[in-house]
Amino acid sequence: MNPTPHASPAVATFVLAAALLSAATTATARENPVDPVSNPDKLDYRDVEARRPDFKEPFLRDGVVSQPERFRTIKPGLAQAQVLAVLGQALKQQRGALGMEWDYHFKFQMPQSANYLVCQYKVVFDESQAVRSAVWRRRQCQDLLPR
């Protein structure tokens, strides 16, 4: 009887781990999620890309700790100066398809948890510099706001 050489379970596990590690040298964010509830106009958000040596604490995308209640005042028609007074300086300002866009990153404490969720928020202004719309990139962030 000729024994056929087989890799031991430990060797197979090592080979699989090495293959996964080499495949994970770059982490690229997935396609921009389009959620009809939190982002009905399909506004675009900037993704983060990081190579393996860049992985470190703190996280690549961080946000300003905020209270969800303050977002109740951000409604269509609100002036840019009022948005600035409520939310502070935007992380990024650029012209988008619907007008001037201000991008923010906020961090909310999760309910009954010591953990935080980083949320991307976009305020879009019309030609008169009043809020046209304000949207969250992900519905989980919108769901943290009080109703």
Image (cartoon, grey):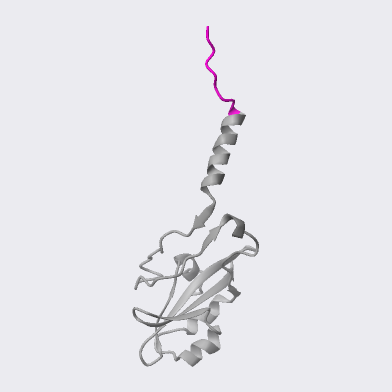
Residue 111 shows in this picture: no
Residue 23 shows in this picture: yes
Indicate the position of residue 63 as horizontal and vertical percent values.
Answer: 58, 72
When asked about the image quadrant of residue 30, the answer is bottom left
Considering only vertical position in the picture, is 86 above or below 62? below
Indicate the position of residue 19 as horizontal and vertical percent values.
Answer: 53, 40
Say whether residue 84 is left or right of residue 32. Answer: right
The one nearer the camera, 137 or 111, is 137
When asked about the image quadrant of residue 36, the answer is bottom left
Prevailing SS of the magenta stretch = loop
Q: Residue at x 38, y 69 (%)?
A: 37
Give yes or no for residue 7 being in the magenta stretch. yes
Give yes or no for residue 41 being in the magenta stretch. no
Indicate the position of residue 48 as horizontal and vertical percent values.
Answer: 50, 64
The residues colored magenta run 1-9
The one nearer the camera, 71 or 83, is 83
Say whether residue 53 is left or right of residue 72. Answer: right
Q: Residue at x 48, y 85 (%)?
A: 73
Indicate the position of residue 128 as horizontal and vertical percent values.
Answer: 37, 93
Considering only vertical position in the picture, is 89 above or below 1? below
Q: Residue at x 51, y 56 (%)?
A: 27
The one nearer the camera, 142 or 9, is 9
When asked about the image quadrant of residue 111, the answer is bottom right
The one nearer the camera, 3 or 104, is 3
